[in-house]
Structures are given as C-alpha cells and as structure tokens.
Image (cartoon, rainbow, N blue to C red):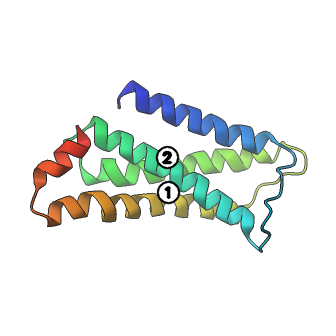
Amino acid sequence: MRPRYLLLIFLYCGFIFWLSSQSRIPDPILYFPGKDKVAHLALYTGLGFLISWGRLRSRPDAGWATLYLVPVLFVGLYGLSDEIHQRYVSNRNFDLFDLAADVVGGLLAQVILYMTVIRRARNSGREETVCEIRG
C-alpha cells in the first residue's frame, strides 16, 4: 500500500485510540438509544473504507479477498483491540455490541465501495474506469 494511505490509516486509528482513551465523551445534541453504536458504526465504516480505498488505489491487480476481506478483518481486529483498551479506561468498558457495530461498519464500507465504485464501472462496460480509480 502506498505510504500516504498507510499514514492516513495510522492517523485515523490514532484518532479512534484517542477517543477510546477519554473517560467521558461529550454527548451529542441529539439523544437517542444506541447512539454509541451508531458512532462505532460510523467510525469503523470510515476506517474500512479508508483501508479498501488505499488498497484499491495502490494495487490495481488485487483480488477480491484483498480488497474486501482484509479490510473487514483489520477493522474487526482493531475494534477488538479498542474494546480491550477501553477496559482499562475509567468509566469505559468492553462491549460486544460495540465490537459488532465495528465489524458491521467494516462490512458496510465494503458494500458501499462495491456498489458505488466497482460495480458501476463494470456495469458501464468501461473496465478502464476501475483502473483509473485504482491508479
């Protein structure tokens, strides 16, 4: 993967780690049940998309497993490490539902990427569009 994408992924993971290190996260203006799950879903969708986009742009010849499975596995493992980390932060805890939201976020990123970028390029009959995106 190109160094700029690795740097972006590293910074994004650092931001998630910083958020997880906070014993109290400011409540959003809008309150609804499960708001923390939505936050996990959004953050990890971003991470999954960033990893996939970096792979797509860096390795035009990458197979589907590299483009779709590796990012989901990375997101799941990083989410697990995040939940373990939260056990040692005051007022935070390990939550399997947060981990599930993280993994679903990683999967959602793959679905969005496939539906909006790759499938559209392949359906238009312009395989070069996929290569343009990748290169």
Per the model, the C-alpha gap separating discs 1 and 2 is 9 Å
Instruction: Report whether 62 appears left or right of 21.
Output: left
Q: Residue furthest bottom?
A: 33
Badge 2 amino acid = Phe
Q: Nearer the viewer, residue 11 or 76?
A: 11
In the picture, the disc for residue 74 is 2
Instruction: Report whether 88 appears left or right of 36.
Output: right
Badge 1 amino acid = Gly
Q: Is residue 53 above or below residue 114?
A: above
Q: Position of residue 43 (x, y in %)?
A: 60, 52
Label 1 Cα neighbours within 10 Å, binned few <14 / some 14-19 / many ≥20: many
Q: Is residue 101 above or below residue 23?
A: below
Q: Position of residue 109 (x, y in %)?
A: 45, 58
Lower sequence index among marks 1 and 2: 2
Q: Quadrant of residue 29?
A: bottom right
Instruction: Kindly state the secondary structure of the residue where label 2 is placed.
Output: helix
Q: Residue furthest front?
A: 29
Q: Disc 1 vs disc 2: Cβ atoms closer than 8 Å? A: yes
Q: Which residue is mark 1?
A: 106
Q: Nearer the viewer, residue 93 or 19?
A: 19
